[in-house]
Image (tube, rainbow, N blue to C red):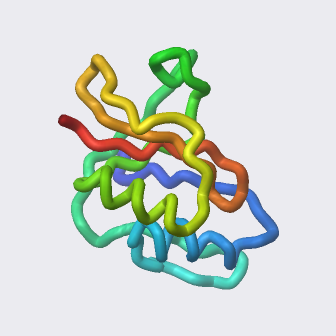
Amino acid sequence: MKVKRIVANIASDRVGEAKRFYGDVLGLDTLMDQGWIVTYGTQEKTRLQMSVMSQGGSDTPVPDLSIEVDDLDEALERVEKAGFPIEYGPAEEPWGVRRFYTRDPFGKLVNILTHR
C-alpha cells in the first residue's frame, strides 16, 4: 500500500470565504466545488508530507497548516494587503527556512514558509 495524497480539511459553515485567502491571496486553483466542499490546490506534482509537532519551532504555537511558497516576500505582501494578521515573523529560522504566521478566515494558524 502507498499513500497517494494527504488532504487538510477545515470545518466551517462559511465555505465561500476560503476563496479570498486560499484562492486570491495564495493563488491556489479551485480543484473542486460541490457547494458544501471547495478544494483548493495545484495540478503540479508535490511532495507528500505530514508533521507531528510538540511546538511550532522557536517556541511558537503549532500551526494548523504549513504552506511552502517560492517567494515569501510576495506572499507576505499579498497577505498584508488583504488584511490578514501577521502573528509571527517574518523570521529566518536556524533550521533553514524563512517564514511567517497568519490566520485564515476561519482562525486557523497558517505557517507560510520558504526554504533558504
Residue 28, given in percent of the width and then of the height, sits at: 41, 71
Residue 29 sits in quarter:
bottom left
Residue 93 sits in quarter:
top left
Residue 41, given in percent of the width and then of the height, sits at: 41, 67
Residue 1 visible in the snapshot? no
Residue 90 visible in the snapshot? yes
Q: Quadrant of the C terminus?
A: top left
Q: Quadrant of the N terminus?
A: top left
Q: Which of 67 and 51 is in front in this view?
A: 67
Please identify the residue farthest to the left as the structure is shown: 116
Residue 56, given in percent of the width and then of the height, sits at: 51, 24
Note whether 12 is above or below 28 in the view shown: above
| 46 with respect to 91 (left or right) | left
Q: Which of 102 and 66 is in front in this view?
A: 102
| 85 with respect to 2 (left or right) | right
Please identify the residue farthest to the right as the structure is shown: 13
Which residue is at a point 24% across and 26% down the rendered structure image?
Answer: 96
Residue 4, given in percent of the width and then of the height, sits at: 35, 52
Which residue is at a point 29% across and 17% down the rendered structure image?
Answer: 94
Note whether 17 is above or below 108 in the view shown: below
Residue 34 sits in quarter:
bottom right
Q: Nearer the viewer, residue 93 or 15?
A: 93
Which residue is at a point 45% across and 40% down the rendered structure image?
Answer: 100
| 101 with respect to 12 (left or right) | left
